[in-house]
Amino acid sequence: MDFRTEHISSWLLYMFDATAQEWLKCCNDDVLRAEIRTHCQQLVKSAYTHGDRSALEQVHKALALIYTKDFSSAQIGTIECEMQPILRDISAIFEKSMIDHEIKQFTHGWLEDVPKDGQLYVKWLKNIISKHSSSVHPLYNDFLGLHAQSHHLAYYLAQETNLDPRFDDILAFLQVGLPVEPKLELAQNYFDEMGNGNPAEVHSHMFKTALQQIGVDDQFLQDNMLLDAKISGNISAALALSRRHYFKAVGYFGVTEYLAPRRFKHVVNAWRRNGLPESGITYHELHIGIDAVHAKGWFNNVIIPAVENNIDVGREIAIGAMIRLNSSERYLNSLLQHFENQYTAIDNA
Amino acid sequence: MDFRTEHISSWLLYMFDATAQEWLKCCNDDVLRAEIRTHCQQLVKSAYTHGDRSALEQVHKALALIYTKDFSSAQIGTIECEMQPILRDISAIFEKSMIDHEIKQFTHGWLEDVPKDGQLYVKWLKNIISKHSSSVHPLYNDFLGLHAQSHHLAYYLAQETNLDPRFDDILAFLQVGLPVEPKLELAQNYFDEMGNGNPAEVHSHMFKTALQQIGVDDQFLQDNMLLDAKISGNISAALALSRRHYFKAVGYFGVTEYLAPRRFKHVVNAWRRNGLPESGITYHELHIGIDAVHAKGWFNNVIIPAVENNIDVGREIAIGAMIRLNSSERYLNSLLQHFENQYTAIDNA
């Protein structure tokens, strides 16, 4: 298997089955290491400079594989394999292009009047979120809320696996090394995700129940993830995994907490309208209430203390929030387009 | 600054102040990358094959700097610096030698009769822990329990900063990607560390209070860390930070939870014997009770389910436990030796 002739994602899958000795040989092979980096740099150039969609797909397929490893615990067969030097070389190159690409899409000048005062900052940021076209999106407010059938909901929930099932781990990463006040806010949010110690109320478990009840299994996930859903999941993972991205992550995930209640009520409506089992919608119904509390705590106890320490932090948090708003919108547009294409196909049949 | 002529730790400190552009240049410099790896490989050879103590000090000074970064949140001045490719190249080489060195010291054959049954396994492991000379160590049972003065306690607590202040983050890392049962056990342990949401009862805050009341500040820590305390802290960090080390970490930190109550009662005695302020010993007193509960939960809800899935997992957990017992003993021996040398110096004065 050679990454120069095969896809880099195929090479990664091959290497994930390699021995510790093979990984060590790879890590110590100066020529190979340089070639991997060159290959990755060429790939992001094709993807982001030349707009090659298959290169973009490769970048995000590979990143998703790496991040899935980062969010997984040990597997006994591979515990001797030191993969980090290679994986971080690849992810550093892909990640930089992915985030730079998001930042390039910003409107000029929107960060010029970032308020210095914490309370004013939060008001300013909430206004940006609410005015963004991702905030009240027809995928939720029209399609899911009023029209979606059970198979649409299944497809939608499959896309959402790019974030929801790992939200507890995202919070665990974000809280590393923080001062007591924001750390406690994230700790409480994390412990809520963990059902406050009650196994039946662990959120990732509830989300899994929804997937099971609507017939989404691993094969369905493998076959049906939209590229924009993968990109959204990769941005979420990147911002959570690297400590240096903490401020961007605070803005990014602050938006997810803030928008969840107004989005999830349409999911609940769709679920009930389709007469699906009540126990499968607990996760979304719970988050309508709890995420309003989490968003408030996030703004008051995580964002305000960070911003009041430094205006540059305020800018970084806003950048993270805007990355979420834009990437979420592109993903929701793609998803709506996907559903509309299905209708067109049926009409034309 | 050149790592070929200066210490690698000095080069890292220099690079931690470098610009994002300098880091990017470093990451993309194939020759430099190869030279860094070669340099690190020579250093571990000097340290571990030739027994060069100053090389060993360099390895652990550099590792401690890298791990401190890994346990720190973002600093606004360095958020654009992508350090991971370089840091993981260095830490992979140092870490492998550090862990291999621990494993080389094991007695032949001790892993031959690892029980397959979970309950029997725990009994077997507890017996190994209790019979190890690190379990009832004279540093605790004699010196701290009966003789230590306030300045000895200060020196002891300074060494202990290699683990205690980051135990919440260690648990946060360990719980990533776990099944619900062990994840909940670690989540509950983590939330206890976070004072169950009460700022005044956050354990890292309590530990800080103890340090402040006994006069240990950052300068004292910089000037007084024993090499064996640094090594112990580096092993703890390595096992917590890499998902692949999870099973070893489960054994390693299971020992710390299991031994804390019998060790900390001597610290409490020393504190009170010296008439130090009562509020400074809350952390240690609390852990005498709570770590007995945590150890029980750790053995029942983390170790047993893992072992019953796979006998190889049982071996890995035992390896982690033995690494903790041996490295803890070496650290306690060094610390006791340090105190005894002080007495000899006074006697000879």
Image (tube, coloured by chain):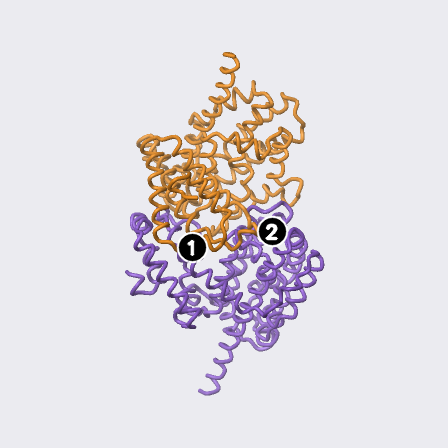
Chain colours: A orange, B purple
CA–CA distance between discs 1 and 2?
Answer: 35 Å
* Front residue (pair A327, B293): A327
CB under 8 Å between discs 1 and 2: no
Q: Is residue A182 visible?
A: no
Q: Give residue A25's mark.
A: 1
* Front residue (pair A348, B278): A348
Residue at 59%, 39% in the rendered image: A204
- Residue A257 drawn above or below residue B78: above
Say which amino acid is labelled 1. Answer: Lys
Q: Which residue is mark 2?
A: B186
Q: Secondary structure at mark 2?
A: helix
Where is residue B316 shown, x and y percent of the image?
A: 59, 58
Quadrant where the C terminus of chain B sits is: bottom left
Q: Between label 1 and label 2, give the one nearer the viewer.
A: 1
**Few, some or many C-alpha atoms within 10 Å of disc 2 (few <14, some 14-19, many ≥20)?**
many
Query: Do dots 1 and 2 share one subunit?
Result: no
Q: Secondary structure at mark 1?
A: helix
